[in-house]
Image (cartoon, rainbow, N blue to C red):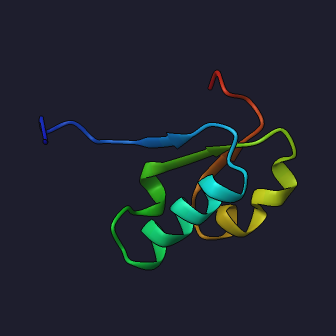
Amino acid sequence: MSNGLPQTIAILGAGNLGQAMAQGWLDRGEVPASQLILTRHRVGHLHPFADRGVRVTDDNVQ
């Protein structure tokens, strides 16, 4: 469903499952990196996603 507005997917607490989902979407080109936000307390684990242009943060409120 599209309403013409940009869509963003946020995965809060991107552990193993969340990272696998994001990796699959990115690898298949289903979701562009610019439309993903991943959060995790230890944000250092998300650096490979940041290198691909995904927004990563340790703050779920952003």
- Image quadrant holding the C terminus, namely top right
Residue 56 in the image, given as x and y percentages of width and height: 67, 48
Give the residue displayed 37% in from the left and 61% down from the top: 31
Give the residue displayed 68% in from the left and 61% down from the top: 50
Q: How many marks?
A: 0
Taking the image as shown, residue 3 lies to the left or right of residue 37, namely left
Q: Nearer the viewer, residue 36 or 28?
A: 28
- Image quadrant holding the N terminus, namely top left
Taking the image as shown, residue 58 lies to the left or right of residue 1, namely right
Residue 30 in the image, given as x and y percentages of width and height: 33, 67
The correct choice, above or below, for 41 with respect to 16 in the image is above
The correct choice, above or below, for 8 with respect to 61 in the image is below
Residue 11 occupies which quadrant of the picture? top right
Taking the image as shown, residue 4 lies to the left or right of residue 52, namely left
Residue 20 occupies which quadrant of the picture? bottom right
Q: Residue furthest bottom?
A: 27
Residue 3 in the image, given as x and y percentages of width and height: 12, 35
The correct choice, above or below, for 5 with respect to 23 in the image is above
Q: Residue furthest top?
A: 61
Residue 4 in the image, given as x and y percentages of width and height: 13, 39
Give the residue displayed 62% in from the left and 37% down from the top: 12
Give the residue displayed 13% in from the left and 41% down from the top: 2
